[in-house]
Amino acid sequence: MHFAKPLSPTGRSARLLISCASALLVLGVTAATPAIAADSVSYTFESSSQKLPFMALKGAGRIVVGPAPGGRSGKAARVNIPNDGRSFKSELVIKGLDAGTHRFSFANYLPGDWQKQDFDTLVAQWFSTQDDSARIKPVVALAIHGGDWRLKVHWMSGGRIQERIIPLGAARLGHWNQWTFTITWSSPNTPGAITVARDGVNVGSHQGANNYHRGQPPHFRIGAYRPGWRPEKGPRLRAGASEAVLFVDDIAITSTAPGSASGPLPKTTDGAASPPRATALSPGSASTGSPTASPSAKIGTAASGGTPSAAAVAAADGTTPGTTKGDGSALPDTGSTGLIVVAAAGVAALTGGAFLLIRRRNATLSPRRAAHRP
């Protein structure tokens, strides 16, 4: 029977050198690969194998995936709430988001026969999970009221809920709207920020408290919700109203850095992208009116069906991911190349040190080996 010959001290040192160098190279390459945040997700409704978010349905409302209307390619989610005296909510619920800054992008479509009513239909809302079961208003909500879009922001002050309503322009029926919300949640000691873009044009903003600062960070809900249709509100707002039917598509949530741009650059009259203007968010809210129309084709992450990487998001924003010093000033970002160079330098240093150790060991062992020769 043959047994493996034990490695000499030199062989063991060489194997150790190779193992350490390989590990350092793997570490460098791994660190050089940009990671996607765990709470960055997207839903395009194109694949039947993709698991949809949790559906919050009250009454006989439904959310069904089918052909997209309005000349849009592919599929979309059809949302409806029938006027039957008990239905008032049909929403997709996405939880698990952290308390940092996120970009929420989605498209929605109001059919040409959408009935304009003098009450709110919430088509997207950010709801703060509470420690108790008390009913409370969402901290942020996108609503259609009559024929206009509006943003509603709520926060707690002096034990009471405060509200600010921000007009976002007139709604266009039979038109796909591409929305982008960039939200930094406030904390008890720091203000938050919200910017809203529709079809590539900034239409509103808010800076200040935007959270109740209770429980978990707000989670995202999209679809249709008519608070005035809750059964306990009675039939007044249901009288003469038709069912609510709208469509939702291309949902993408991306964890990003505070202060990132809210969406695509505004368009000039010739259709070219204009450079962003340096605007400071004043306390309270701002509205910049109605945006221009955008193509109905799917855009953004939905085109590829994937989730954008942090590097891709930064490139789209015109920002560069990096680190900061203790005083808050930015350090130069070396990126993937810098990490690989550092890893290679570490391998070289390790190789040189191991080589010197091997030579010293061999020099020490040589007299002993000579003394034992016959």
Image: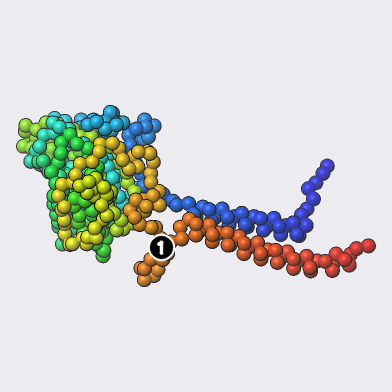
Position of 300 compared to 115: left or right? right
**x, y percentage for residue 152?**
16, 50
Amino acid carrying mark 1 in the image? Thr
Measuring 14% from the left and 49% from the top, which residue is drawn there? 289
Answer few, some or many: residues within 10 Å of disc 1's Cα (few below 14, many 20 plus, some between 14 and 19). few
In this rendering, the answer to whether 358 lies above or below 303 is below
Measuring 61% from the left and 54% from the top, which residue is drawn there? 22
Q: Considering the numbered disc 1 on the image, is that residue within a helix, a strand or a loop?
A: loop
- Residue denoted by label 1: 323
**Outermost top residue:** 67
In this rendering, the answer to whether 21 lies above or below 96 is below
Between residues 116 and 234, which one lies in front from this camera angle? 116
- Which of the image's four quarters has the C terminus? bottom right
Between residues 204 and 97, which one lies in front from this camera angle? 204
**x, y percentage for residue 262?**
27, 52
Position of 34 compared to 167: left or right? right
